[in-house]
Image (tube, rainbow, N blue to C red):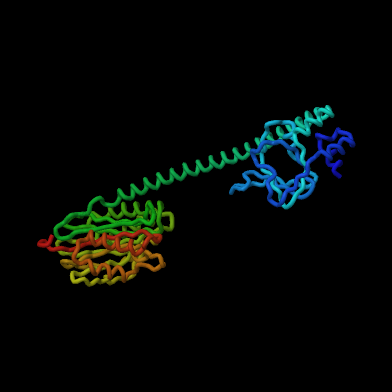
Amino acid sequence: MTINLLSKIPLFADLPREELDQILTELDVKELADRNILFREGDLGEHFYIVMRGELEVLMAAGQAEELQLNIMQAGEHFGEMSLIMPGGHRTATVRARGSATLLSMSRTQFLKLTQNHPELSASMVRVLSQRLDATNTQTFHDLTEKNKQLQTAYDELKAAQSQLIEKERLERELQVAADIQLSILPDELPQLDEFNFGARILPARQVGGDLYDIFLLRDGQVGVLIGDVADKGVPSAIFMARAHALIMAEADIGMTAGEVLRVVNRHITRLQKSTQFVTVLYGILNLKTSEFCYARAGHEPPLLLHSDGTVERIPHSPGMALGLWDTVTLDERTITLPTGSTLLLYTDGLTDCRNTLGESFGLERIKTTLSGLSSINAQRVCDHLLGTLVNYQDGSKQDDDVTLVAIRAVSKESS
């Protein structure tokens, strides 16, 4: 069996049978226990081996976290012939026993002595080197082809990722432009008056939101107060919000009542609007002489009135319809008087619907409870405190809707 194995090894295939018998008597026998190392990657190569019994593992980075098994050598296989013909070479991998194993070993000295007696081994050596070189070239070409494929795939993925990054940056720039435009629509400063002070805050759920507010001077000692909430969020809602705001501002200063303004605006929106978007609005006109606030409510949240003694009243209301749904709109139109020391709060439903980490909404009662303790501060501080309380209540949970607050506080000239 041993002679047959030797005769199948290209380096010895041309030797006569009797010479193979002689070689067998000169080969060393090496026994390995399970997981014994025959040689390590980087060791100097001095011997050629034939596996007689058992199995051997061929490993890269043996004993390390990134250890990689390259091959399993079975009985009858041989390895290390290059060590016989290339002095000074180093092992390119580690060989370790997989269970107990028996090997035959030939040193370079033994091989060189053999070539002196059998010069034909030199021809065999050249043949082995040529075959090894051809195999190496073939493997190198295959590896390069595979690496090129991998590089092309990586390049294509990188190019696609770059395109996505460019598109993402473009969208972010457009969102920032939209956010800047939206902020430019909101008032930079609120009116400063002796009899009333005003406050407002807005907290978009996204970079661009769909809420709106405005407080602006009208003719004949009046102030327009506006708050609105466009259905949905994002850029489409912001565009719709800008349109609704522009239409209301265009109609507000021509002497019409709040209800008349919203009805005209609704006709414009339903004529121009081609989607299913709509906006809830509360628009009111504050008379600075009489302290009367005449407002029209189009499906929006009813306002809350904080009295000077800390009691909070939700203004009575009747059903109303949002703008942009139907050509004819039903509005809730009312007139209330703001007593000295009172604060009127307008808000969007994002305030009531905001949830904490347990999924519990902030709710109307928490708004009223918080508001009841704010009767002695000005309108802006009321808005700031309410929004701060809401953010603490959320405790980092996701905000699902925009939040907007507008406050009007009636003050006496003596206390202003």
Indicate whether 47 appears above or below 293. Answer: above
Q: Quadrant of the N terminus?
A: top right
Which of the two residues, 138 or 79, is positioned nearer the viewer here?
Answer: 79
Percent x, y of residue 68: 64, 46
Is residue 75 left or right of 342 when viewed as pictured? right
Which of the two residues, 202 or 92, is positioned nearer the viewer here?
Answer: 92
Do we see residue 324 in this rendering? no
Percent x, y of residue 53: 79, 49
Residue at the image point whose x is 81% and y is 31% from the top: 114
Residue at the image point whose x is 38% and y is 57% from the top: 205
Residue at the image point whose x is 59% and y is 38% from the top: 151
Is residue 37 left or right of 263 when viewed as pictured? right
Is residue 231 left or right of 87 when viewed as pictured? left
Indicate whether 205 appears above or below 130. Answer: below
Count every numbered label the image shows and give the total: 0
Residue 266 placement: quadrant: bottom left
Q: Residue furthest left?
A: 414
Q: Quadrant of the C terminus?
A: bottom left
Percent x, y of residue 97: 71, 49
Do we see residue 370 in this rendering? yes
